[in-house]
Amino acid sequence: MLLSLPPSWLHGAEAGWEYRLAKSFSGRLAEVEEELQGIDTDLPKRPTVPVGDQGGTGGFASLHPQAVPEQAGDYAIDLRLAETGPVDLVALVPARRYGVGGLEPQFGLPDAFTVDLLDASGEVIARIADERGLWADPVRAGHPFVYPISPPVSAAGLRISAERLRLDSDVSDGYVHAWAEAFLFAGERNLTRGAAVSGRGGSTPAAPWHWSDAFLVDGQTPLGLPELPAGEHRNVGWISEGRAKADEKVWLELDLGEVRGFDTLRLFPAKRPTSDLPSGFGFPRRFTVSVSGDGEEATREKKLETRNPGHNPVEIPLGPCRGRRVKIEVSQLWKAYEDYPAFFALSEVEVLDGERNQARRAAVRSPDGMGNVIGSGLQYWNAASLSDGFGPDGRLSSRRDWLVELDQRRQLELRRHHLLEESAAIIASWRRAALAVFAVLGGAGALALVALPLRYRFREKRELARVRERIAGDLHDEVGSNLGSIQMFADLAESHAGPSKELKRIQRIAAETVSAVRDIVWLLRPQGDHRIGTVEHLRETSSIMLEPLTWDFTANEAAWQVELSDEANRHLFLFFREALHNVLRHAAASRVEIRAELKGDRFRLSIADDGSGIPSEKLERPSTLRALRQRVDALKAEFQVDSRPTAGTRLELDIPLARKHSKPSLR
């Protein structure tokens, strides 16, 4: 294949003479590019399959002794519904696993399988899918399988029959068949909740907390919350004040405005504020739901104890009831680490009458709310987020519509893949024709001298980007994870054996190294909207390195959008870490204030501490702050030091910016 991107989107000479030739004489190439542009306009409107771990349960998995069953149906999974219903859509979500080799987005997916609807006696009444060659699918990387059924079929069960399995990389002699979740919809209602699940033959992998028959119908998927892209949205959820102990009580209450009928409470977990926290951050472990009317005592009360749902909504059946106020009283908070505060956090609360949300725009109150708390980037935690119809990353949708949208995205991506192949084939055919003509005319050699370096340069740039991404991923996943473990075990050792200089030094060195690795990973990642900005990265570095001190990081709105070159970022981060190292090692400070601001075409960074300061005679020595001055020279910046004994030190860095210095504003 000649190209893997639409050639019209390449720049200048890199588009290639073969593309320009095809563009001039092939009407079909213009049609392909027009359709590709339409697809690329439509794709951002569709939800995506997440790559990161969304938590929750793993699903159903079974191990078998051979890839192909001896008899048809030997590797089948049967679901028996609690009640027969008119099924109009079936959706199957592939399981995923995170192993030493990275993410397996379709763990245990058969290369071929069939899907049948069953009657009450277990007999097949309708075949709705016969999939083949799935391992060769170029775009299906964890996308759900979605099968509309029209007209609906009244069914009492479902059967998934695998015909060819793949060897489990963790088990040398076992072939795995796995699914994360199965949905049978009658309208918006999921009929599989509470269904009986049974697998034929095989054995369950030795991880009962992750794999279980019941997990196939528990409503939890590895695909995250059912959110659809909806433009800019800054309300990320609601979070309580931190608690030292998990058993400190917290409550919040939704006021529906009037007495209304409903039967289910649906809670949406909050988005984890940092990557080192697990999915399902802040979801309560033990709580009570009570319903009351105007000025009345609770008319309905239900106590619950839950496991971490990850990034999955949790439905709490209440039975038919009427009320105005719904109160959630938490008696056991989420708390993952001994030294990390306990929180109660959610992104949305829905009070459902069937599938109708009675709590949209409901008033929310709690004596424990933290008000408008700034989250990552420009997002906020506030009480209004709990009833605005949005999750942390988009507009909340029904599970059915969300699965259909995910499948439509897969169809668009598959069509895009085929169009790219067709585009490359068209260009390749014109290239071959042109080379034949030029060979007859004796010009093939000259053209090759022009075309080949351009193609080589393009391939080399892509290869370099892949290498950088792989190195960044390895550093983040392996080195970063191990350093985080060192920090955690040092904290545990300190809690058991008491503080010591050696443990403090291990903790400090590990934190500093984590910060350095994060800087390297940040610089290696290709620039794009998915990467946090320079100032946000400085703030996260502060949170890691200055953890033992009191610190404050502020920036004006323009500074959050600053985007420096990779080389300038490298020198800026080295300057910043060296400055924080000096504070930690030499200043004996208790508080550090950091201020970043953009004024005109100047980016200014100020770092001030309340430490012992630098004696004037030492400050005059050429060796003092030499490393910082080297970075200043590389940045072609201005640098000032204001330090007085016992009064602390202030460092002022003033960097002139090139013409392109900031990302487009989000406003």
Image (cartoon, rainbow, N blue to C red):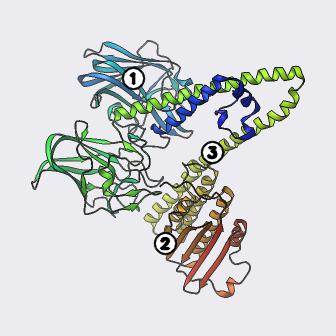
Secondary structure beneath dot 3 equals: helix
Residue 487: percent from the left, percent from the top? 51, 60
Q: Which residue is mark 2?
A: 549
Residue 59 seen in render:
no
Q: Give me the C-alpha separation between circle 3 and circle 2.
A: 34 Å
Task: Kindly identify the amino acid type of the residue bearing the numbered disc 2.
Answer: Leu
Q: Residue at x 88, y 28 (%)?
A: 445
Locate the N terminus and report the quarter of the image it occupies.
top right
Closer mark to the observer between disc 3 and disc 2: 3
Task: Kindly identify the amino acid type of the residue bearing the numbered disc 3.
Answer: Glu
Residue 366 seen in render:
yes
Secondary structure beneath dot 1 equals: strand
Q: Is residue 622 above or below residue 663?
A: below
- Location of residue 431 (image quadrant): top right
Q: Which residue is mark 1?
A: 147
Within 10 Å of the Cα at label 2, are there few (<14), some (14-19), or many (20+) other Cα atoms? few
Q: Which residue is mark 3?
A: 469
Task: Kindly identify the amino acid type of the residue bearing the numbered disc 1.
Answer: Tyr
Within 10 Å of the Cα at label 3, are there few (<14), some (14-19), or many (20+) other Cα atoms? some
- In the displayed structure, does residue 653 sit left or right of residue 78? right
Closer mark to the observer between disc 1 and disc 3: 1
Q: Nearer the viewer, residue 146 or 20?
A: 20
Mark 1 touches mark 2? (CB < 8 Å): no
- In the displayed structure, does residue 25 sit left or right of residue 208? right
Residue 652: percent from the left, percent from the top? 61, 75
* Sequence order check, earlier mark of 3 and 2: 3
- Location of residue 519 (image quadrant): bottom right
* Sequence order check, earlier mark of 1 and 2: 1
Q: Give me the C-alpha separation between circle 1 and circle 2.
A: 56 Å
